[in-house]
Amino acid sequence: MKRIAVYGKGGIGKSTISSNLTAALSDMGTKVLQIGCDPKHDSTRLLYSGFNDITVLEYLRDTYPDERSLGDIVHTGYKGCLCVEAGGPEPGIGCAGRGIISAFELLRDLNINSIPIDITIYDVLGDVVCGGFAVPLRDGYADTVYIVTSGEFMSIYAANNILKGTANYNPDRIGGIIFNSRGDDEEYERVMRFSEAVSIPIVASFKRSREFLDAEKLGKTVVEAYPDSPLVKSFRDLAKMVLDGKKYTAKYLDEAELEKTVLGAATSKNTMRRSSPLREADMISEPRYYTSRNVQRNEVLHGCAFAGAASITMSMTSLTTLMHSPRNCAQFAYQLASNAVKRSYICEGTAIHGFSHPNVACTGMTESTMIFGGNDELRSSLKSVLDSGRKNIAVITSCPSGIIGDDVENIISDLSSQYPDATIVPLIEDGNVNGDFTQGVIDASIALTKAFVNASSCKTDSVNLIGVKTISTNCIKNSDFIEGILSRLGIKINCKYLGNDDIENLKNLTEAKFNLLLNPDRFAMMLKQFLEDNYGMSFSSYIARPGLRATVEWIREVGKYFSKEETAECIIQDICSEYNAHLEFLKNHLQGRTVYIASMNRDIDWILEMLEGTGMKIMRAVVIDRPDYTMDYDIKANYPFVDIIEKFEINDLISDINLKKPDLLISAYPMDVNSEIMQMYIPLVPDIGPFGALELADSWVSFMKAPAEEGWRNDGN
């Protein structure tokens, strides 16, 4: 069976050429299948009286898989030829290229090859660079490609691109150029110059003729309507040539050569007009963009922005999260929240309230959505949420929405005007297109702030916690530790920013007198910068972090700010007494032991502080500089012996550890070192305060007390 593809610029007449070629072949007794691959789905209409039947994509959308039949989408036309229209979405909606791929997959699944056919003709739009329209060029589809062009430059430009696309797959299958005249006296010469330049012959020429229009009015091809016309003889000659199947190698011109060949223009790099660069004074200054480290450095992304944004919105009570996504993407994001609930219940005995019962909805995007667009699904789902009485809604977009270009913001704007009491926040993350997980967290925090915060000059004796980590196991534990200290100072928490809180508290964000930053990581620093830039909020000099020294610093600062110095010192004294008592216990077990640290986080001074207190000997402390972890903290200020390594070989590091033979290796991830070296982990999000380091050391003691070999291994002896 022969398979040919007829390509050409939109509107150039390739469908007219294809359908008349099919008719001419059918007159010769050839069994032809013509597949229209244009969203206009008008390729085959003249082969069966101008009637447009259901397209493959309409059928795919409206018919359940177990009810689909090949006979529903393959129609019989002139002289027994078979006709299929792939179809496509409405203009400006969805992805027509994806539709071509899906249409071909359905035809394959329904076993189109089981029908006895002599030749298949693919009628394909050729001026769209989308990969979907290149499917007929791939192996297993067209073995010969014909290119329809007029003498207009843009039509020849499209023909040149089609040659380039063919060369990307299998170049040795060009059947020739079909010249379809528009009536310009000089166009044949232009096409001939192009033909000679690329060494592809003009295999057929069709002059502008009234017969095409008259036949179309009859709902017929010229071959059927005027079988004795000289024009029809040209189609029969082309049909014989197609059956003969001579092929040429695809060659193409660069743009300068193409212009010179077709238009006679000398457009070399030296003669082309140069554009004037836009002056900085002409530019409108853009607001600062608050990015994750991965996005800033264009590194491999860790997680997607869609899931990151959802981790914030789902943790907020009184907020509904509508995920414009496939169900599996929504399930993945939801599982992050549910797993955080399980971990915190198991490890801490409590969980983030919002995660326990998140208000979540999903549009449930499918393959059909990718083709026909998701605007209707989003509008319907969002309206359903609004009609249920939900007033605060965050809409998060996934990858498919961004790929097909759904009009999310205008849909939200339209429904916001219909439901004036509701606040709908668009989070256009498009899956991972907008960045990594941390970028999604930053974006969601900023967008919710802009939507809900009421700027107020009224201040209360309260504190905002900035940089809450919603999916960390110790999220509640960290907040409770700080809240316990503030309570002893007679100070309330105003808002936990942003996560594990209520939208109503977010609205009053600017009413707090004091803003306390949690952990010196990128996420917290970007939120701090945003709040300073947009709300003029000031922050503590010290950060609520792990370690005794850090804890004393921020408690003392808060006490001074609220004129609670005496109470603050009492709290510090109690903490120091408890810390030192615990440290004495650890000394008895750890003093003199050797330790090697291999971290991917600069914020490890709380570990070093504890190690020095226990009397352990630090053989070496290495920080592998990774952009996905804390990079802004200056560990060398207090511990200059720490090695910061930007580029390293893991085997070299392992060799150094094995050579030094420490009693304990503290690392960010398991390392393939000598089995006699005990390994323990560094938590990604450590406990705020001094006691997390002590609890970590307690686990070291427990492991060191354990026998080197499990006793059960000797049970059978």
Image (cartoon, grey):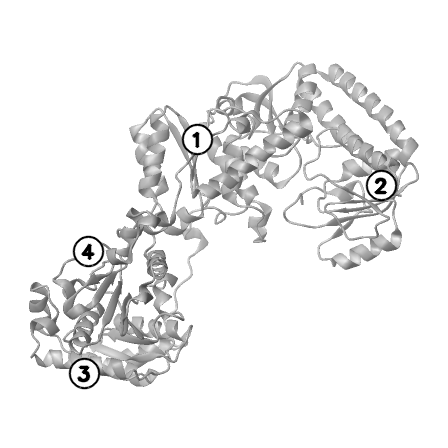
Q: Position of residue 257 (x, y in %)?
A: 36, 79
Residue at screen point 34% across, 57% down = 106
The mark that comes first in sequence, 3 or 2, is 3
Q: Nearer the viewer, mark 3 or mark 4?
A: 4
Q: Earlier in the sequence, mark 2 or mark 1?
A: 1
- Give yes or no for contact between labels 2 and 1 (Cβ–Cβ under 8 Å): no
- Answer above or below: position of 280 versus 704: below
Q: Nearer the viewer, mark 2 or mark 4?
A: 2
Disc 1 residue type (three-letter): Ala
Q: Label for residue 2?
A: none
Which of pointers 4 and 1 indicates the residue nearer the eye?
Answer: 4
In primary-sequence order, the first of circles 3 and 4 is 4
Q: Which residue is mark 2?
A: 710
Q: Nearer the viewer, residue 330 or 586?
A: 330
The residue beneath circle 4 is 53
Residue displayed at 66% across by 22% down: 480
Q: Amino acid at mark 3?
A: Asp
CA gap between label 3 and label 4 equals 30 Å
The residue to which callout 1 is attached is: 451
The residue identified by callout 3 is: 237
**Spatial CA span between label 1 and label 3:** 68 Å
Element type at marker 1? helix
Between 331 and 516, which is closer to the camera in this rendering? 331
Residue lying farthest to the front in this orientation: 716
Q: Is residue 422 visible?
A: yes
Mark 3 or mark 2: which is in front?
2
